[in-house]
Image: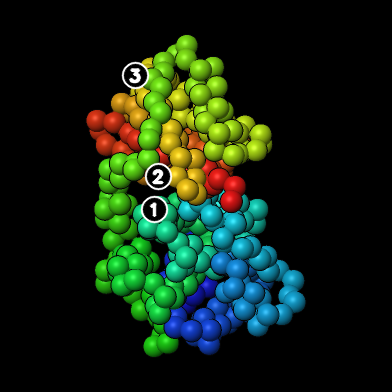
Amino acid sequence: MTGPGGTAGAFVHEGLFYRGPDELLAGTVPFITSGLAAAEPVLVAMPGANLWQVRAAVGAMDGVRWADMTEAGRNPGRIIPWVLQAFIDEHAGRRVRIIGEPIWAGRSDTEYPACAQHEALINMAFAGRDATILCPYDVAGLDDDVLTDACATHPVLVDGAGRRSSGAYAPSEVVARYNLPLPAPAEPVAALAYQVDSLPAVRAFVAGHGRVAGLDEDRVADLQIAVTELATNSIAHAGGAGVLRVWRTAEHLVCEIHDDGWLADPLAGRLTPAKDGVGGRGLVIVQALCDLVRVYSTAVGTTVRLHIRRPL
């Protein structure tokens, strides 16, 4: 089996199953130091407590970039384009190593399906790229279903017993399994049907709800941009119309766009387009601006649900 560094043009995606701090450090610190010894730039993106443990164990070393995944990857759909791809593209022509821990015990049930799809889509997004990505999983803190999904989204598994191929590897099945109808809101919903001449009304509608939800003006502007991008996509590619629904939960303002289009490519919105490309930027922008994006898409229609965190 290929070692954790991989060879040129060979993408490596490994799931690290650890139990406790000692096993976490045993699985991550040598990964970092051997990467540096091979002159490979290293990115470590983990939730706060784990990030600081690993950083303290590694010490001050040039060539390592550190990112708190609770912020950089708060929205799982943001991780591939704005964290992983950005780092890989920045070091084009060189092999890189990345530790990315997108799933931890504090993730909510609402976030988890997007996390599982993210891990599956990594394999499609970076096939053929010069990168090794190691994804730690806390076997003591995560449910068995999460660990089962990890076996399906990582072709190689690593634990105290060594490295092995995953016999359960099936990332496309994970993407499909979590492409499910989104749960109905328990809160009161406001709705607005829109078409080509309705975009000013769409912006005013979401701005009003954003302010009532306590968002500051910068976040109101972010919300307007995100919803306008989706509504514009509906008008251009999904029959010229759609329905916008808005509601509030204790933690989020939620905006949902439904139209008759179909996002047939599961990587839609998960990769930044080429700098000289035309189009394809709308969903990537939406992922960057929102705290969570959930998508359900079939040949008969698409629902995109945006979550913007409300001030506490």
- State the residue at coordinates (40%, 28%): 190
The earlier-in-sequence mark between 2 and 1 is 1
Task: Give the residue at mark 3.
Answer: 239
The earlier-in-sequence mark between 2 and 3 is 3
Mark 2 near mark 1, Cβ–Cβ under 8 Å?
Answer: yes
Task: Give the residue at mark 1.
Answer: 110
In the rendered image, the vertical position of residue 30 relative to residue 69, given as above or below: below
How far apart are the two marked residues, 2 and 1, measured between alpha carbons? 9 Å
Q: Decide: few, some or many residues near mark 2? Use Cα within 10 Å; few <14, some 14-19, many ≥20.
A: many
- The numbered dot on residue 294 is 2
- State the residue at coordinates (33%, 74%): 165
Visible residue check, residue 92: no
Q: Position of residue 128 (x, y in %)?
A: 46, 56
Q: Decide: few, some or many residues near mark 3? Use Cα within 10 Å; few <14, some 14-19, many ≥20.
A: few
The kind of residue on which mark 2 rests is Arg
Corner quadrant of residue 196: top left
The earlier-in-sequence mark between 3 and 1 is 1
